[in-house]
Image: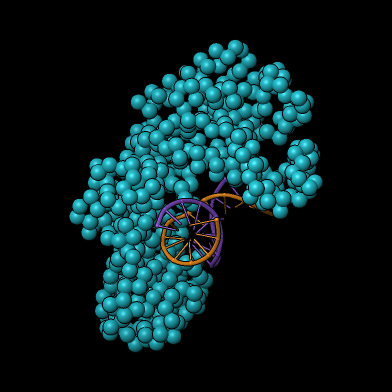
Chain colours: A cyan, B orange, C purple
Amino acid sequence: MPELPEVETVKRELTKHLIGITFEEPIIYYAGMIKTPLKEYQSGLKAKTIESLDRKGKFLIFNLNDDHKVIFHLRMEGKLFIVDKKNHSSSHLSMFIPFKNKKEGLAFYDVRKFGVSYYLKKEDLGPLEELGPEPFDIKDSSYLFDSYSKSNKPIKELLLDQTIMSGLGNIYADEVCFASRISPFMKGNMITKENAKSILDNSISILNLAIKSHGSTVRSYKASQEVSGSFQKYLKVYSHQGDECSVCHTFKIEKRRLNGRGTSYCPKCQHTGISLGITGKIGSGKSLATSYFKDFGYKVFSSDDEIHRLYQDPDFLLGLKKKFPAIFTPYLDKTLLSKMLLEDKTFRRKFEGFLYPLIRKACNEFIIENDGFNKAVEVPLLFDARMQKDFTYLVGVETTIQDTHLEERGDKNISDRLKFNSINSYDKHRHELDFVLTTNGPKSALKDQVEKIVKEIAVKLN
DNA sequence: GCAACTGTTGCTTA
DNA sequence: CTAAGCAACAGTTG
């Protein structure tokens, strides 16, 4: 995962073996990794000796015994191992640089081929040009406060911005937010000076401890053949989604996407507010239940409303038409759509595969946008859309008088509506619910049930 | 069996 | 300018 501590570990490990080593001409198997002219790279490294190694943020630097240097960025999976010339594994080998008068060489393994390398004059900054200071070099947290305050982006995204401060990646950014008791979703311009100080202090202490632990070993990443990092045992949120928070012992660690990155946090310790997924069959009374949560101060969102909004969206309709031309005659035929959803299983799968991710994304955006508030999100097909993990708690709404409810709201096609029960896997997943609301009785009884849940959650949040 | 997800960054598009 | 989405790639997980 190479973030700063892992790259520092690589640097320390390689320093033991590389100082004074003379390169032979590099053998390049994946030319895409070399970001400066290939021929110069090969001829430039040949017969040069390594004088010292350096690290800036997540970049690794070899200083050669002339006026040039070599820069590596390992990105996601890049690994620099010293291996025997005839013993190196050939799978995912992007480059091999044999050592002169030695039986070993430096191998660059990179499964995903995202890693890059540069051959540059020592005075050229190259990719380091825009790089911000490391936390260790920031003497005053007001620098961070000033940088973050200017931005409307979520604080975690700003922590990942290497031009402001370098070194934090996805794992340590989550850990720093947790240690600082700050929501990763909070906008930069909302943070206080105390927040900024906390972020700087925790960045320094977490990175230092991680360096001491030789980084983290997660998934396939290892700094060298010999060294396995152990910082993963100190991780409090990253890789802990679903576990009870080790600090408050009240809620599970949650995980959701923020700008395409998995983001783990504790809703209580980091003051994000909790989120409820409200689900149930058609006509069960979900909307009414959700509206009661609103009465108790919750922010609410309905995925049905989102679907209606999507059907007004020309871009969505265009995408839909491209994927499912059959339901356009020539305009979207909702009756035909309902019929096909009920009768054609293959069509339904495909349609759901198109629609559910959009719903999931919209719900996620709503939750992130309403950071700090408690939220109730109505999702009729929550289980089918596999959104169980997207909420703090799951609330089921049940009734034995579905048809009465549908009649009450003036539904014309009750029997057709009820057919949709067959494609809702609520019953199969009922045991996953944290709360069940029953809506057979008077409305006031439902409101009382909602109030009970609201109070229980308020106690947990303190 | 397919879709989503994975540690990073930079470029394109609106 | 910002913001979002995608691209680079290949393997693992549900």
Check the image and name the residue furthest to the left: A139
In terms of depth relative to the viewer, which is nearer, A403 or A76?
A403
Tell me the quarter of the picture where residue A10 sits: bottom left
Quadrant of the image containing the N terminus of chain A: bottom left
Q: Is residue A218 left or right of residue A304?
A: left
Q: Is residue A126 left or right of residue A339?
A: left
x 72%, y 19%: residue: A407
Q: Is residue A150 left or right of residue A273?
A: left
Q: Tell me how many marks there are.
A: 0
Q: Is residue A332 shown above or below A119?
A: above
Q: Is residue A50 visible?
A: no
x 77%, y 26%: residue: A413
Tell me where residue A252 appears, x and y as whole percent: 43, 36
Q: Is residue A194 visible?
A: yes
Tell me the quarter of the picture where residue A52 sits: bottom left
Quadrant of the image containing the C terminus of chain A: top left
Tell me the quarter of the picture where residue A75 sits: bottom left
Tell me where residue A134 appears, x and y as whole percent: 27, 59
Q: Is residue A260 shown above or below A376?
A: below
x 64%, y 23%: residue: A284
Tell me where residue A64 appears, x and y as whole percent: 29, 81
Tell me where residue A423 appears, x and y as whole percent: 71, 35
x 34%, y 55%: residue: A168
